[in-house]
Amino acid sequence: MDKLLDYINLNKGEDDKYKVLENVKANISFRGSNLWILACAIVIASIGLNVNSAAVIIGAMLISPLMGPIIGAGFGLGIFDFDLLKRSLKNLLVATLVGLLVSAIYFFISPFKETQPELLSRTAPNIYDILIAFSGGVVGAIAITRVEKGNPIPGVAIATALMPPLCTAGYGLAIGSMKFFFGAIYLYSINCVFICISTFFIVTYLKYPKKKQLDERSEKKVRYIITSLITILILPSIYFAYQLFEQKNYQHQIDVFIEKEFSDKGIAILYKKTKFNENPKKLELGFLSTKFSEAQIKNYNSKLKQYAVTNTKLVVIQDTTDLKSSILNEIKYNKSVLSEKDVTILNLKKQIAADRYDNAGLLAEIQILFPEIENLAVSNHTFNENTDSIRILPIVVYKSKVALKDENRDKLNQWLQQRLAKKEIELYQQPNKVVAQKKTTKKQKK
């Protein structure tokens, strides 16, 4: 048992308590160089969020001095040094206001105001963010109290991510979105409060000397304030975590439905969008070539319940104009995170657009070589062979005064392959009804 306790003993390698307190007090102030460093870090983080660059955001978190006053507040609370607590909170407020101002100005003047995924990920905190903030705060507090500081502090700065939500709140102010502002400020508050509280626990555990001895009633009041603050912050995050769980489970069931009913049957899906927050929820699907009747769509809607997908309406987008608009909007929204599937869709769209043929122009050229041809039509046909891949083949139908000889037909086929830049085409002659009728009349006379 003693060996086990020796392994988890935090007093080993601990630095002098008074020296640690002096270092903490020295890092809480936001004047001079610290203020300039903070402003520059805010600009760097804002640029990273603006261009969706994780590397730039991480760099900003590493140079940010925001951890100083938060750790100071935790120490002030732990040793009942209320002057240190007030100074830390005052400096944290100054740093927060500066961060909001600088990021809001940047995003206001920036020509790029699209909502990037890095911004979106900082607007809906949940219970996991609390666990990260608390664990990061514990690591940070332990590292500060060591003789050998090591490298946990940079890792804590990255894991707890104080800068990105603060900049995202500034983005919300710049574009006038209170949803973005309050979501990001909530995440920022979670990080600040739980780093502070975890620091308080470590300071209390290590028995740092109290600056002021409080009576039992005052200590209960401090514990009551901490408990209330934790409860106020943790309840909304539990709700958001539950929402996240429900959304992930719902999306999984949607994926199972799509795979079983469409993908496994060789029906290629061109567009997919789930609207989870609507009532009823919506599943929008667009298909590459398959068309569905109203009865089929109704049948698929009834099948959703078999996959535990409730309160959901399946909407099949069959109008090509609407489908094109939906795809373009989706690509614009997610342009920074194009997946392999999105790239394939774009290539298919370009290919389909390039495969439209000028029948009148082709006929004029062909009649120079084959005057007996009266009319011609070329169109692409799509073949699906029970896979997600498709085969596009040009079909050529021509009308001729007289039947082409085999050698002329071969020449026409080769000319079309060269002219259309296709390795393979299908060539058909349209039956001449008048000729066929005359042949029948002659046979009857005989």
Image (cartoon, rainbow, N blue to C red):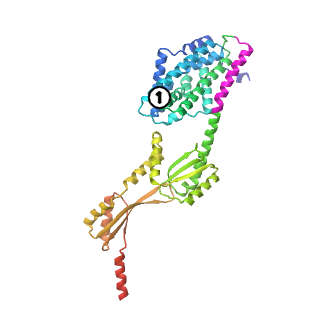
Residue 231 x/y as whole percent: 67, 28
Q: Quadrant of residue 188?
A: top right
Q: Residue at x 44, y 27 (%)?
A: 106
Q: Is residue 364 left or right of residue 319?
A: left
Q: Quadrant of the N terminus?
A: top right
Q: Residue at x 70, y 11 (%)?
A: 213
On screen, 86 above or below 195?
A: above
Q: Is residue 366 left or right of residue 279?
A: left
Q: Secondary structure at mark 1?
A: helix
Residue 2 magenta-highlighted: no
Residue 381 x/y as whole percent: 42, 61
Does residue 99 appear in this view?
yes
Q: Residue at x 36, y 76 (%)?
A: 433
Q: Main secondary structure of the magenta part?
A: helix
Q: Is residue 243 left or right of residue 165?
A: right
Residue 373 x/y as whole percent: 30, 69
On screen, 217 above or below 277?
A: above
Which range of residues does the magenta coloring cover? 213-236
- Say which of 190 and 266 sits in front: 190
Q: Quadrant of the C terminus?
A: bottom left
How many callouts does the rendering have? Answer: 1
Residue 233 magenta-highlighted: yes
Does residue 16 appear in this view?
no
Residue ID for mark 1: 46
Q: Which kind of residue does numbered mark 1 sit on?
A: Ser
Mark 1, Cα crowd under 10 Å, few <14 / some 14-19 / many 20+, is many
Residue 228 x/y as whole percent: 68, 25
- Say which of 185 and 42 sits in front: 185
- Say which of 300 and 355 sits in front: 300
